[in-house]
Image (cartoon, grey):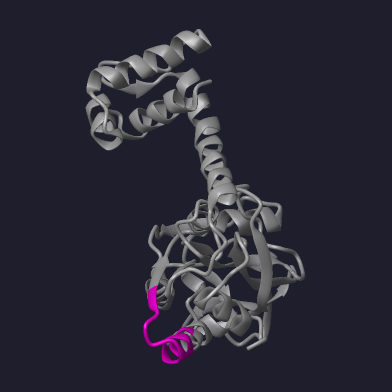
Amino acid sequence: MDVHLLRTFVAVAQRSSFSDAARELGYTQSAVSQHVASLENDLGVALLARRPVSLTPAGARLLEHARPLLLRLEAARVDVSQPVASPADHLRLGVSPLAVTARLVDVLTRIRRDRPRTRVTLRVLERATVAAQVATGSLDIGVVEGVVAANDPLQLPDVGPLKTTGVHEEEVAVLLPAGHPLEGRERVHLATLSDAQWIDAPEAATPLAQLRTICGSDTLRGAFSYEGTEVQTVLELAARGHGLVVLPRSVAQRATRVTAVALASPKLVHRTELLYNHTPQGPAEELVKALLGHG
């Protein structure tokens, strides 16, 4: 399959529009139509219905393959061609929501104090997006986090040969609203909360799907879905009784009008990792050393 044709197909599929894809790619609409037709001829199947534009079953399957393929190709291009000279004093840092900690801000403050001309770009993104942008060179460093079994690495998408380094692990806790029958406990078992209602906030707390996998059961009921990245919003929802949520202990203890109760079993930790592609240099190197306790 021709990569250019595949890229055009993805653009049309994502926008459900040949004209919108043409504007994005800088092609004429006729050229976009020809690209898609050529790809369909190559594969011998229809990928898109035209009126209205929608994916066929074969097109939906190809889209699942195409996105990671194009990402890996871009990551390979950056990995091979990116210069290794010291970058300018511009640090591009991507973090997942719960990785924005006081320690991280302190390190950034120190870097800018020691390097007054350094410009910092901080992007708060979904975990998978952080990994993808580090792999493709849009970010210099990524800091991502998630809940795992003790000493296990985070499960990140396969976007290229990224280097990962563990920075921190801490206990997790369940947030219980005031008056909850278990709020006086020191620790709770996840299995005892199978009948409770939960907040599903996959980018701002432990994803409910992950907790169900850990329990080996789908009995954990999502009562409220939150699709943003604002951790404070999740804390407020928990305080107002919209459902339970699992967060790192340090974050849970910041909440008001709720009780943070440690999770006794299964044994889980909240893990934070650094992601980078080439050897960090300049302000990126200082950030890595500081977060790892070497500077």
Say if the magenta span includes residue 216.
no
Percent position (x, y) of residue 109?
Answer: 44, 88
Q: Nearer the viewer, residue 15 or 114?
A: 114
Say if the magenta span includes residue 115.
yes
Question: Is residue 180 something one can see in this rendering?
Answer: yes
Question: Is residue 181 something one can see in this rendering?
Answer: no
Percent position (x, y) of residue 7?
Answer: 42, 30
Q: Give the quarter of the image for residue 15.
A: top left
Q: Nearer the viewer, residue 127 or 237?
A: 127
Residue at screen point 50% across, 11% down: 42
Q: Give the quarter of the image for residue 224.
A: bottom left
Vertical order, 215 against 90 (above or below): above
Vertical order, 238 against 226 (above or below): below
- Residue 207 lies left or right of residue 4; in this view the side is right
Percent position (x, y) of residue 195?
Answer: 58, 61
Q: What is the span of residues highlighted in magenta in the rendered image?
A: 108-120
Residue at screen point 64% across, 56% down: 162
